[in-house]
Amino acid sequence: MTPHQRFLEAFYPFIKIYASITGRSKQYKKSLLVTPPVSFYSLTAVFKNEQVFRFDTLRNKPVLIVNTASDCGFTSQYKGLKKLSVQYPNLQILIFPSNDFNNQEPGSDNEIEDFCRLSFDIHSPIFKKSVVTKGSDCNEIFRWLTNADYNGWNNEPPSWNFNKYLVDKEGRLTCIFSQFTDPLHSILIEHLSCFS
């Protein structure tokens, strides 16, 4: 970790306190279990080596998709994501690094993966750095997550790094949690427990 990343890690508990006091940690959007017009399982994503990951391999598993950055005040949420992966072994966590917000992910794909593995022992799939906000460059997954014509109900792009998208075992986008919701927050755990 760089000195700046260590500073951000030390600062994260204050962000959590702020989110708790303001009620932001409990803010989320939930669907009424809408069947998506475009199947989640028809999607693909690309790893740094250009290998393609097919989402049809995720059938019958809950999936948590997170847009991430290494130099963000929320980067310490990788710790919670790691704990979730241990606590819920059937949960598939997918990491999508992005440099969309204030140049907080400037590194190469190799640097990003090394940072995640060495600093937080993350072994969830980490995909090639890509665009997650709306636009023609947006990756296929976030185009699906942020377009109601595809997912059935949500049109909002991520507002910052570490937004979390929960897809149920039937491939339906069920909940969206903001960057202020820690991965181990009770509101997120409560929704995950429905899949146990």
Image: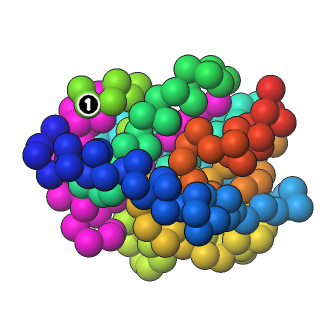
Amino acid carrying label 1: it is Ser
Q: Say how many tags the image has.
A: 1
Residue at (31, 52) in percent of width and height: 11
Residue that mark 1 sits on: 119
The residue sitting at the left extreme is 3
- Place residue 157 in its image quadrant: bottom right
Left or right: residue 97 versus residue 169 is left
The spot of residue 181 in percent (x, y) is 57, 54
Q: How is the image coloured?
A: rainbow
Left or right: residue 194 versus residue 158 is right
Q: Quadrant of the N terminus?
A: top left
The magenta segment is 91-117
The spot of residue 16 in percent (x, y) is 48, 53
Decide whether residue 55 is among the magenta residues: no
Residue at (62, 22) in percent of width and height: 87
The spot of residue 62 in percent (x, y) is 70, 36
Residue at (67, 59) in percent of width and height: 26
Left or right: residue 66 versus residue 170 is left
Left or right: residue 62 versus residue 85 is right
Decide whether residue 114 is among the magenta residues: yes
The spot of residue 32 in percent (x, y) is 88, 61
Residue at (65, 24) in percent of width and height: 88
Q: Nearer the viewer, residue 51 or 128?
A: 128
